[in-house]
Image (cartoon, rainbow, N blue to C red):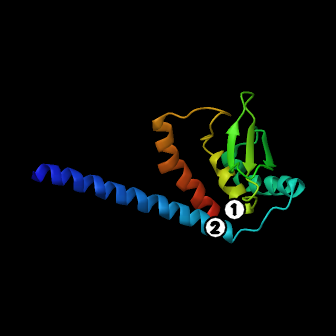
Amino acid sequence: MKNKKSIIRSMLDGALILTAYVFSLSALEATTDLNSPKISGQSELESKLVEERGKLNDRIGKNKIVHARISQDKKESSHCYKTPQGEYWVVLGADDANISTLRHELHHLTDDDVPYENSDASFGRKLKYLFWEEPRAAIYAAKD
């Protein structure tokens, strides 16, 4: 009986720790977004892309072709992806078009931790994203 209680207690502790982690990461991203200057349109986005990429150029590399756009679909969230041709796209959600989100998505390009367009990630890849890639991008976006 004690063993069963111990297992249940460990599972509850793990769930609590995971919830606290996800809440903390979400709070960091939300706070950063609230305080970030908005990007008003495509021309401003392209200008900011050049500026922010320049800050990471030694880590992104000069040979990567990077495009950016602001989604017009309110349901599309911000993300980045790599095309089969090896080009990169940063997509800012209609409600997320700000400097912080641009910096966040660009940081994903530094270690090439960008999925291919329309790819399904394995469970291990999702764990790496949640516990390694996403926190690093969130912290980078928060500092200035």
Label placed on residue 88: none
Q: Using residue 38 as the reference point, say whether residue 2 is left or right of it.
A: left
- Report the quarter where the C terminus lies: bottom right
Residue 17, quarter of the rendered image: bottom left
The residue pinned by badge 1 equals 100
Residue type at the position of mark 1: Ser
Looking at the image, tell me whether mark 2 or mark 1 is earlier in sequence order.
2
Q: Secondary structure at mark 2?
A: helix
Regarding residue 78, the answer to whether it shows in the image is yes
Residue 88, quarter of the rendered image: top right
19 and 45: which is toward the camera: 19
Q: Using residue 67 as the reference point, say whether residue 35 is left or right of it.
A: left
The residue pinned by badge 2 equals 32
Label 2 crowd (10 A; few <14 / some 14-19 / many >=20): some
Query: Which residue is painted at 52% across and 61% down in the image?
Result: 25
Residue projecting furthest to the left:
1
Residue type at the position of mark 2: Thr
Circles 2, 1 touching at the beta carbon (< 8 Å): yes
Q: Using residue 14 as the reference point, say whether residue 48 is left or right of it.
A: right
Q: Position of residue 3 (x, y in %)?
A: 13, 49
Q: Secondary structure at mark 1?
A: helix
Q: CA distance from mark 2 to mark 1?
A: 7 Å
99 and 123: which is toward the camera: 123
Q: Position of residue 14 (x, y in %)?
A: 32, 54
